[in-house]
Amino acid sequence: MRTKRIMCALLLIVFVSATMNTVGAARPKIAGWTFMIYMVADNNLDAWAYENLDLMQSVQLTDDVNVVVLWDGYDIPARMYKVVYEGRELVEGFPLNGEEVNMGDSGTLKTFVDFVTRKFKAEHYLLDLWDHGNDFSGSCYDEHPVDHLTHDEVVAGLERHHIDIVAYDACLEAMIEVAYEYNALGMEADYLVASENYIALYGYPYDVILDSVTQNPDMSALEFAVLIADEFARYYEPRAHFDGGVMATLSVIDLSTVDEAVTELSKLTEALEAKLKENYDDYHEFISIARGEGNLPWAEAGWEYYIDLPTFIASLNETLPESDEAILGYVSDVSYALEEAVVHVANTEPMDSASALGLGIWFPPSEKPYIAYRGLLRYENLQFASQGWLDFLYAYWNI
């Protein structure tokens, strides 16, 4: 009997001790934000990676904000680092450390995001795709081996993850084709932060952005996205007044509303296509004038095939005859839908804000560029192309 009492007492002590340890044990801290940078510097941007890392490392980060970089340089293999004040720490256990990885492979992106979200848990996640961008064709151009991420590969790399903000420190990704591709393929993300323009080599002002979120780690995804856009424009404001000016623009796109914008745009393009078949000369001229108004200031620098979509829609309202009440109604519906989709735009002051309203679209003036790049740019394979836009372009080009 006494032995049983002793055993019971010991079991009780063990139980109470285990319970106390469980209750009293410190749980792993959940950060407010984890900022993931997919830094593809295995190309001619290699030197600028060091510049941006220096900016990140100048911030006195706290446990409320994780900054994690997968960095693939030109002469060095890929490694994952956690950024800390005045330095960076190698993240042990990451399976791709020390390898010459293919950053243009969705599997690499997936391995990165899977690992970071498991090890650096947070209330919110931001993925920063850092490199060259090439509109709807993709981004993240690796030279060893030669490859890049297409937008469907970005979606595949983020499978089963909810990302609050997908941000592009890369050129020309604020396009309706890109946003719609993400929605149509089921990417779970709230906001796209991207530019209709070139992103200058200096990239984002990472010191200001990371310091701001460190000071306020409870900010919402929308608040953080807007802050990034505003600080980006503010960063380039001094540069906009010399050396010909830097036309900096950054948009915040609410991905949950893009489908509605595409639906309304499809109704409009179907109606315009019918008008072009009835009276080609007049309606080609109406549309051409509006297309010209949508030309962006940087078109002369090489991207003349893309226009600002909201400006084009607004200009259609001025060029189409007042008798086209039904079409003008579609124009109004598209305009409203785009206002819902583009929740914020930040531009440097010298830029004509009326010409950069936050969302671009591919609109070559003739069929020649389309034929020249057909297959290479994969436009026909985009989800957006099947929503009426490509049929409208054929009608506009009269082919």
Image (cartoon, helix red, strand yellow):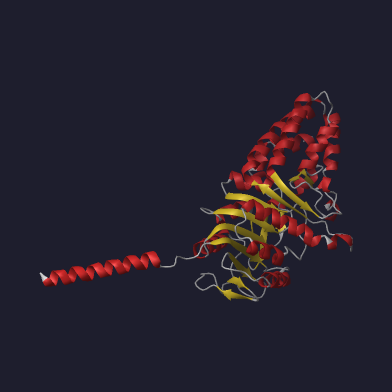
> Residue at 56% across / 55% down in the picture?
158
Tally of numbered tags? 0
Image position of 281 (left or right of 381) = right
Q: Quadrant of residue 134?
A: bottom right
Question: In which quadrant is the C terminus drawn?
Answer: top right
In the image, residue 286 lies at what x, y percent?
85, 33
The answer to whether residue 357 is left or right of residue 9 is right
> Does residue 81 appear in the picture of this structure?
yes
Does residue 362 lie above or below 85 as drawn? above
Viewer-side residue, 167 vs 60: 60
Q: Residue furthest left?
A: 1
Front residue of this view, candidates 162 and 235:
235
Q: Quadrant of the N terminus?
A: bottom left
Can I make out residue 78 in this image? Answer: no
138 or 394: nearer the viewer: 138
Q: Position of residue 372 (x, y in %)?
A: 76, 49
Image coordinates of residue 244 in percent, x first then y, are 89, 60
Task: Say above or below: 239 vs 91.
Answer: above
Decide if residue 123 is on the left or right side of residue 306: left
Counting from the top left corner in percent of width and height, residue 41 is at 68, 68
Residue drawn at point x = 59 percent, y = 50 percent? 189
Q: Residue at x 75, y 48 (%)?
A: 358
Q: Quadrant of residue 363?
A: top right
